[in-house]
Image (cartoon, helix red, strand yellow):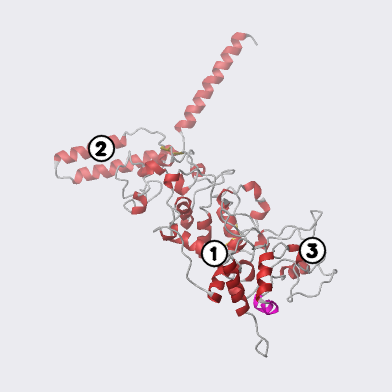
Amino acid sequence: MSYRKAFIVSNALMLAAFVWAFAKDFNAPWRPYQKKYYQMSADVLEKKAADEKDPKKADVLKAEARKMRHSPMEIKQIISSDLGRFDRCVTCHVGMDEYTNPTLKNDFTQNPYKSHPKVDSALVKAHPFTKFGCTSCHSGQGLATTVEGAHGWIKHWEKPMLKGVTIQGACVKCHGNFETLKGAEVAASGKKLFRQHGCQGCHAINGWGGVISVDLGDIADKPFERIAGYNFKRVKIDGKELPDEHHDSHWNIQNWIRGHLVNDPVAVTPNDPFAHLNAEPIPPSGMPDFTQEIRREEADAVVAYLSGMTKEEVIPYRYHVPAPAAREPQLSGAAHGKYVFEKYGCQGCHGLEAKRGRRRFNASSSAQKEYDPKMPEKEQFEQMSLGAEPTLPDLMGTYTHEELVKKIESGVSAADAKKWSPKGPMPMVYMPSWKGKISKGELDDLATWLLSIAKKDDSGF
């Protein structure tokens, strides 16, 4: 091909590329929404003009209607430099753009045309859109201009738009005082449930809590490559499997957390207890089954609380609202010991009020049959699942006060557990050493309470 022909062909291709780009931009999915909003707003203004008896005011309304009807189609953007956000949500949600709709109010009821709910509330007024943007509270993908992209309902976008009460997780990110904050009641309830059920006994949050499992201080940032797809497929919400990952982004961290509360975690993460795929057997999730303790709406509250556990988002210090210093109740003796038991999350393994030890997979317990290597694997799995932590009232009578304090200080390693199946996995749950973590006074009162709940024999001792 001659240089002349190559030049002509390359120019033709370049022209075609420009035409294609122009056509694609002209048919961008946000344009119909914006155009319809301007038309609807102009119709409202013209109706007001027709009903207006003052001719001058009517002319002003008509001029506003003309201006609205001929508004240019454009990408609208909120730049929040402090938070490092560039949100184009108002490109479609024009009613929430205060430059187009200064009052931030309208009578439209359908998305994306309606205005933001409760614009006169203290909550919204304290978070002006031009300062905070949209995604700092709602999450999603601020730079996107398609419905799926903006809401984060696309593959590889790991922070889709928060829905329902989980949006209260945004309050947790900045407000240390969220437990007393109006509008964050569900997230506050989630924190209370987290502690009530002893989750902090295994999971620390920013260093405070147990070390048995992962620190949840950044759980909202957990990347999906650390969650196997087949595990997501085991999650059931309201008894139904999650749809495909591309549909409305059901495969998200909120449903991953929720799935561990509304399902038995062993069913979600069964791992490889019979070493079919690994050299050594790997136990299932050591997390207790909370399905009989935590209702669906309570699970949502815990999800809302943990949705605010992020370290990826850089939030300026001046945006943070500190919490008032927490005061511990003035208790002593056994009453204080019970408080210490709950404060450090001991109920996470030993059950609410220490009434029944929770599951400890493949640990030997009185509820199991005698081990038989000829048992089918399904039955062996069921028997291993009956392994449990000791029920403390049955055990406490075998210790003196000093022995119990020393036991708690020393902890109990997983290797000390008696396995039901000698070929099965090492029980995952263990009691860490509490020496240096629980004060001497707390330890003494904890031991006093534990001894007070010990079962007595017929003689009363």
Q: Tell me the distance, in whole angstroms, between the alpha carbons under discs 1 and 3.
A: 32 Å
The stretch of residues the image draws in magenta is 392-399
Spot occupied by residue 130 in the image (x, y as percentages of width and height): 37, 41
| Numbered label tally | 3
Q: Secondary structure at mark 2?
A: helix
Overall secondary structure of the magenta stretch?
A: helix
Q: Is residue 362 left or right of residue 47?
A: right
Question: Tag 1: residue type?
Answer: Arg
Residue 261 visible, this angle: no
Which type of secondary structure does the marked residue at label 1 adopt? Answer: helix
Helix, strand or loop for disc 3? loop
Residue at 51% in and 52% down: 308
Disc ID at residue 64: 2
Marks 1/3 in contact by CB < 8 Å: the verdict is no
x, y (%) of residue 175? Answer: 44, 53
Mark 1, residue position: 195
* Neighbours of disc 3 within 10 Å: few (<14), some (14-19), many (20+): many
Mark-to-mark CA distance, 1 and 2: 56 Å
Question: Compared to 49, does 283 lie above or below?
Answer: below
